[in-house]
Amino acid sequence: MSGYGRTQDASSRHDARNVTLLWLLASAIMTPIVVFVFGPHLPPGHGSNEAAGQVMDNTVLLATATPIALGVLVFIAYSLWAFREREPHLQADGAALRGNSSVQFWWIVATTTVALSLSGYGITRLLETGAGGGQGPEPIALPPHASSALQVQVIAQQWQFTYRWPSFGGVETREIELPAHTLIEFNVTSLDVIHSFWAYQLGVKADANPGINNIAYVTTRGPLAFEVRCAELCGVWHGYMYNGGQVVPRAAFASWIARERLRYAPATRNLTPYSKTYFPEPQRRAG
Amino acid sequence: MSGYAKRAVGTAIVTAAVVAAVVLYVALYLTNVPGSVAATSTRAGAQLYLATVPEAERSDPHPTWVSFYAVNATAGDWRHVTTYEVPANSLVRMTIYQFDSPSGLRNPFISQVAGTVGGVMTLDGKVTRAIPPEAASHAFAIPQLGISVPLEGVEEEAKNACEHAPCSLANAHRTISFVIHTPGKGLYRWQCFVPCAAGFIQGFGGPMQTVGYMGGFLKVV
């Protein structure tokens, strides 16, 4: 090896050490800030156990991404500074680019480890309670005491959500109120096209498909105002397909549902028997 | 004038023309809003007359589509408008002349009147809280305000049925009246909830997916 080669290798090692030290320093400072300062404020908030779980998931993802992003930024910043052209009047080629099998090997090991770890984490979290997502008609991620959950049927149609309560005489309501500190089983279906029931602050999102019962679980916490939106483009008034909901103390919920049963008694008499899905008739004018 | 100056002037003219065209397009887009019909003022409050018909006027771009109209039925004045202007924080009496036959509701829940004063409507003069779901021809609903009124259809075999707008009160029809209390100023969309679009998938295409037929806005001013 020539003397020039040895000098260049020593310089490379020096640069690698500098970049690594700067990266470790930046990561040591920024990662705790991301976890402890930004983490608690990440969406969708702490309105339910599932929403709080999603905040934790987002924090884990951000904490993992922070050192990776810092690695890229530190390398770019260091390169701009350390490898700048110091003698612009000289017209000379830079150092030759060479492959480095050691760097390539560890790059593959590191990225594979990160990807597989996050994948494992995601699968584990999904299998715990479903993470607030729709699990189809036969959910496999059952929360404890799932059989005693309060059932709420979400009926989507162009363009509004209504809610049916099998535990309360099968009454259907326009509004939704939920009791605090209660396990809820949402049974989501549609009467026409594909919609999606997205209760943002509760951390629930489940597609509403015609003829399918899509089940999602959520455990409410304290009183909360939440928003329900359709998250599937479903026609001309899709943007208006939303309504608000409330998580209220259990006594307040009992009063509310009693009032709703009285209020919608005439409609309840006209309803078809409660079912997990509906294939509504008539469709006299359908093409 | 030198060649350079000519090119500069030409470039400036073309640039100005392009900018003017873009500004004109944006201005026309921003100011092009659907026409509206204002509720008439009476001693009893604001009053709005609407009608539903099985088919629009023959001169309409979609003459076979079902549609709402704003009407002065006695004067024979029919306007194909679905944006209705009403005063804020007021009682507004709405009367809908229903000339169409039943389609039936996909969700029987909508068979109940909701959000009107007293939770009722009058159907041909009779106070009504709900109708048989299969008898519904259309609905007038403003989901944001919790207002929903099912509109019962005329009998399939009714004599003298109206085929297309404009209709006459001599044609078979139902008269539905109700009163709503308007909220503060704002734009609230309304729609029909009956799958009444003949010939479209599940009856929910065409006029149900096009503002100006079975949906529009309540402009509260």
Image: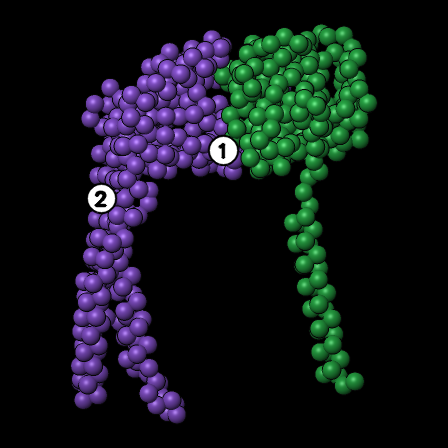
Locate residue A121, reporting x and y percent: 22, 44
Q: Quadrant of the C terminus of chain B?
A: top right
- In percent of the image, x 32 and y 22: which residue is there? A252
Q: Colour of chain B?
A: green
Q: Quadrant of the N terminus of chain B?
A: bottom right
Q: Chain of mark 2?
A: A
Q: Nearer the viewer, mark 1 or mark 2?
A: 1
Q: Colour of chain A?
A: purple
* Whether residue B10 is situated above or below residue B146 in the rendered picture: below
Regarding mark 2 in the picture, which secondary structure is present there? Answer: helix
Q: Residues within 10 Å of mark 2 (few under 14, many from 20)?
A: some
Residue closer to the observer: A279 or A52 = A52
- In percent of the image, x 25 and y 54: which residue is there? A37
Image quarter of residue A20: bottom left
* Whether residue B68 is situated above or below residue B25 in the rendered picture: above
Locate residue A185, reporting x and y percent: 31, 24
- What colour scheme does the image use? by chain
- Checking the image for residue A28, the label placed there is none
Mark 1–mark 2 CB contact (< 8 Å): no
Q: Chain of mark 1?
A: A
Locate residue B108, reporting x and y percent: 51, 15
Among the two numbered marks 1 and 2 on one chain, the one whose residue lies closer to the N terminus? 2
Instruction: Say left or right for B137 vs B166.
Output: left
Locate residue A281, reporting x and y percent: 53, 15
Q: Is residue A261 visible?
A: yes
**Residue under numbered circle 1:** A241
Q: Is residue B210 visible?
A: no
**Residue under numbered circle 2:** A121
Instruction: Identify the amino acid type marked 2.
Output: Tyr
